[in-house]
Amino acid sequence: MIGIGAMIGTSIFVLIGVATAEVGAAVIIAFALNGVMTIFTASTYAELGSSFPEAGGGYLWAKKGLPHPAGFMSGWLSWFGHTVACSYYSIGFGLAMVNLLGYFEFSILGMSDSLLVKFFASVAILFFLAVNYWGVGATGKTGDTVTFIQVLIIAFFISFGIIYALDTKGIHILDPFDPIISSDKELTSILMVMGFTFIAFEGYEIIVQSGEEVKDPKKNIPKAIFISVGVAALLYIAVAFVCISNFGVAKVGTEWGENAVINSATEMIPIFGAPLMILGAILSATAALNATVFSSSRVSFAMGRDGSLPRPFGLIHAKRRIPHNAIAITGAIMLFMAIVFPLHIIVAATSIVFLVLFSLANMASIKLRSRLTEIDVGFKTPLFPLFPVIGMISTLGVAVYLWFLIPESWYIAAVWIVAGLVISIFARPKEEYPSIIDQKRVPVKPLSREEIETYKVVLALENLGDLRLVESAGIFARYFNGDLTVMNIVEVPRAMPLEAISQEYIDDIKSGLSKAIRTAPTTVTVRPYVSVSYDVAGAILDQTKYEAANLLVLGWKGTRRRGRTVLGRNLDRVVKEAPCDLVILKTKRLNKNIENILVISGGYFETRKALLLALPLAKEYSARINILSVITDDRTIQLVRGNAERLSKMCDRVKVPHDLKYIHSRSLVNTVIEQSKGCDIIVMGSGPQSALERTMFGAVYDRIIRSVDVPVLVLKTARGDRPQMQMPPGQPRQPIPGLD
């Protein structure tokens, strides 16, 4: 949705009338050809975006594949392109607000419409600069919601417009398109308008900029790019067709201009057409502004941090942890462009910059292809290198044709390009800025035979002071002759760049993690791991897959939740999507010496595996296991007793003292709560749950987890190809350093 939102944005409400004024009904051809031309560059972005799923896009690829100053110029152009796009989106917001005031026949201090547009544009820019300065940003779900509403509004407009045209014109619906290219227009006019409207098709740059946050980027980035291009092209063509078929070229282009879509809705749907389209325009402009103000300031911040721009660009505010200088300078350029220049110059200048940027990306793809292996490539550009060559020539060619339509836009672009070339002489960017720590989604690698045979435990440690959790995970790893990975995820708010987390802070985390893993048994191989991520759950799941883990251990504070979550937003997602056996361990009030372990007997498969985790704890602390079987239905007595007896034999095999206890009760929850009063920890497997249940471990077991006041270990099993827990022979255990 992010690509579709960026491509239709403000442009679908503003550009259609302006473009129609230049080329008439052939605007439909211009949009169609833009869609075709975009496929060549989109293929390049699909290949490189899926192969290098990292923030940076064209800037990153030019830096990797082309000699200096191509990398610098790519970042320089990307910064200016996103910045001036913000100015354009703010103008779109201003136009929508002026239409809203006109609909309600309201004026502000007698200001003219043109002055009001600039006023509202400035207000919008200042507001979103403040939003970014205070470190607040819309989430991806918010952007998806806005895009969905926007598409619904446009789809309604298209549907109603076609019905309206058929009702009023019947078989003459196509008359305004005869001829589609008028005698006073040439083919070169279409090329000029293609360049002018190209800003509507630059959204796939934003898709690849989000590569680090995309699940399965090798598959989903190409899919998102091509779907976005196709949907955007169809929507532009359909909206232009509806406007022109109903009201003709002269009215849509010459008379209405940038207000063509809103005025068309007003004419076709007198009661609520205008408010509906104005709402769509305002939502689109604000969503695009919020996202693009964020991305434009982060481009200049990244360039400042790697030495391409002066050091102040790369500084982080000490308290707010945001790139305040980059935001301020970027905002000043936005305001200047929005206030000083008219809409058509801003649009054309933005299109020129992106066209040149895309030509550099095509050039870089030719150089980078030789470095890609079969494993790296998620999508291969067809007919290579023909596609990137056509993409490079077509984007540069259309950019040149814009000179003949709006030469002033080329003056602005040329000044920026020359300034960039001059600055690049003094820029000394690092070849690769050292990452703070692993902050990308890790690929899933093929498993070697040794890795398949080695049992792996992964512990996601949120609280570095929770030594009992580290101890327990280490005991599990030692008991099953496996390795232990202890990971800590540093969560970064979406409105803050990952680089805002200082190296000093990371060093403190690493130091604390190093101290924490000393509590693990000395015979266990322990690997510490720190990740900086926007998505805690995603980082945990990715590392679990990368490690090919058999057991994932998570700690839980025991906080009772209300609403739709059981354990918390991140924990709930990990529990649902974990690719291996998963343990939730509540260590609050866990005694230093465990004496009594209460195992809840349920389904044999789940309880057997849960018991396999209770046994190493029992042997470690010389504890006694109490196997509790609650009989809620007399018809299950034989089954319950059979399961309990098999669990008893498992304890006998490793010589762990234990008791069997059978209780007849209608309430499993109340019985467990009552029996838990004399134990040090409860161990249980997950219960049955249907596909429709919104539970983590089954409705009854969720209630037990949240209700008991003693430590709990609950296991959720994963049936798959990974090695299962086996019964190791009973043997003495070493004391845990620092705890025993």
Image (tube, helix red, strand yellow):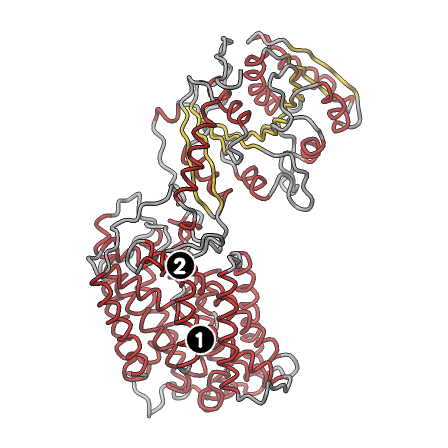
Which residue position holds label 1? 237
Q: Which of 117 and 313 is in front in this view?
A: 313
Residue at 24% from the left image edge and 52% from the top image edge? 369
Q: Which of marks 1 and 2 is nearer the N terminus?
A: 1
Query: On screen, 14 above or below 365?
Result: below
Residue 37 in the figure: left or right of residue 477: left
Disc 1 versus disc 2: distance between alpha carbons?
33 Å
Q: What element carries label 1?
A: helix
Q: Residue 660: x, y in percent?
A: 70, 13
**Closer to viewer: mark 1 or mark 2:** 2
Q: Is mark 2 on a helix, strand or loop?
A: helix
Question: Residue reaching furthest front?
Answer: 318
Q: Which of 632 and 507 is in front in this view?
A: 507
Quarter residue 517 falls in? top left
Q: What residue type is labelled 1?
A: Ile
Query: On screen, 372 above or below 738?
Result: below
Q: What residue type is labelled 2?
A: Arg
Residue at 51% from the left image edge and 42% from the top image edge? 537
Residue 535 in the figure: left or right of residue 386: right
Residue 588 in the figure: left or right of residue 131: right
Q: How crowded is mark 1: few (under 14 residues within 10 Å), some or many (20 or more)?
A: some
| Residue 298, numbered label | 2
Q: Which of 672 and 116 is in front in this view?
A: 116
Q: How crowded is mark 2: few (under 14 residues within 10 Å), some or many (20 or more)?
A: many
Query: On screen, 448 above or below 427?
Result: above
Residue 252 in the figure: left or right of residue 670: left
Residues at discs 1 and 2 in contact (Cβ within 8 Å): no
Q: Residue 93: x, y in percent?
A: 51, 75
